[in-house]
Amino acid sequence: MESMIILVFIIGYFFITIENIISLNKVIPSLLMASICWSLIMFWDLPVFELNNKNPKILLLFHLGKASEIVFFLIGAMSIISIVDRYSGFEVLRDLFPTNTKRKFLWIISLLSFVLSAIIDNLTATIVVATILKKVIYDYKERLYYLGLVIISANAGGVWSPIGDITTTMLWISNKVTTVNLIKWIFIPSTLCMFFSTLVGSFMPIFDGYIQIKKSNLSKFDRKKGFWMLNIGLGLLLFVPIFKTVIGIPPYMGMIFSLGILGLITNMQKRDFSMEEIFRNIDFSSILFFFGILLSVSSLESLGILHNLSHWINNIVYTWKLTTFLFGLMSSFIDNVPLVAATNAMFSYPTDHKFWHFIAYVSGTGGSIFLIGSAAGIAAMGMEKIDFFWYLKKISWLAMIGYLSGFLYLLVYPFLFL
């Protein structure tokens, strides 16, 4: 029966990877996979070995709690971003571009994507910057090149922040990494990834010439209010890891607290929207996808399947550094969320072991190599109808340059100060 559960997981995962080919929302196989796997465990009363408890129902409640931590963290973060957007907080960013050359504009856009993704996550940052690009770059072909570098920069910026990518958030909430050491180890390689990809890309002929940037149509009052709300929203998001470090409160509670504060602030102002509208704008499809994936992986974890798989990998692969490198390449065409969820359950390295820092880096930046390897890439593909093979031909090699540059730094960093 364990083989049946593995088969269900493989089939469900296969349908997730071909989502764009068969036009089937990946949340559907994700939820079906989770419910079927746990139903089989309970129906056949399969032996589970975890937490010294052999009761499947109790284990399911335990894993439900772990998955819910991430779910409520995402709900809080998405709600804060939605409120900031309703105040045109991201629209005012367009007024901060002081350049008239395409090449300088590329660097500004890349840096903006890199910084924003560390605060509001790489998916949201890509959506925000892609929206700005539509209002600035009117030539569709040119815009695609900019957007390709945005995907790389946003994914790179997300990996060094505990709230910048769903995978790093998973590692952080699972106590695999701490905020300080994650930034200490991953900030420089992620910066190198963004820098070298943008540097090489900036020499492409498409970025020759000049650009005329139009200011936003916001009134002076709305611009000031939007900029004020942007600062508050980003500040409250940054407050979450600080809150956890100082007080020790779980990240999802810190995020819910920040959402409550922002809701209180907006409630004290005259506004033309309700909190119900904010919650309706949340991408619950993505949240349910993560929820289904986490529960599916937990079923394999509870049966000891992932534990046995980790031993097999350790016996086959020469070093864990090579393992992480291969996982990064896998994340380019396999969704990195289930990959990291499985990695969490497969390996038992202690908190802040270099293995987890490598995983944080490769799972995010490796997803830029192919268009379908990250949530940012899939979002950009949906917004601008980017062709998979166009991206493979024009952008993938730039993403590989960035990926290798950061990974090589991680390899040589321990020897730099000998």
Image: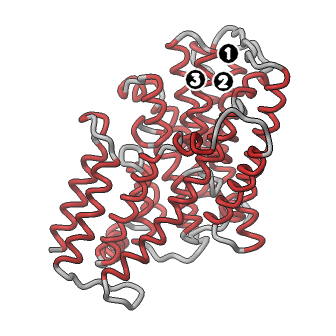
Q: Which label belongs to residue 280? A: none
Q: Are marks 2 and 3 in contact (CB under 8 Å)?
A: yes
- The Cα–Cα distance between marks 2 and 3, rounded to whole angstroms, is 7 Å
Q: Report x, y in % for residue 60.
A: 36, 75
Q: The residue under label 2 is which amino acid type? A: Leu
Name the residue rendered at 23%, 75% in the picture: 41
Nearer-N-terminus badge (3/1): 1
Q: Which mark is residue 146?
A: 3
Q: Quadrant of the C terminus?
A: bottom right
Residue 256 relative to residue 222: left or right: left
* Structure colour scheme: secondary structure
Q: Residue at x 65, y 68 (%)?
A: 178
- Depth order, front residue of 362/129: 129
Q: Determine whether 253 is above or below 219 in the image.
A: below
- Give the SS element for disc 2: helix
Foreground pick, 91 / 412: 91
- Assign a secondary structure to mark 1: helix
The crowd level at tag 3 (other Cα within 10 Å; few <14, some 14-19, many 20+) is many
Residue under label 2, please give it. Answer: 106
Residue 110 lies, in percent from the top left, at 65, 32
Residue type marked 1: Lys
Which residue lies at the image location 39% right of the left edge and 91% below the top edge? 52
Figure quadrant of the N terminus: bottom left
Contact, CB < 8 Å: mark 2 with mark 1? yes
Residue wearing tag 1? 102
Q: Are marks 3 and 1 in contact (CB under 8 Å)?
A: no
- Give the alpha-carbon distance from disc 2 to disc 1, as whole Å: 6 Å
Residue 180 in picture, x, y percent from top left: 72, 64
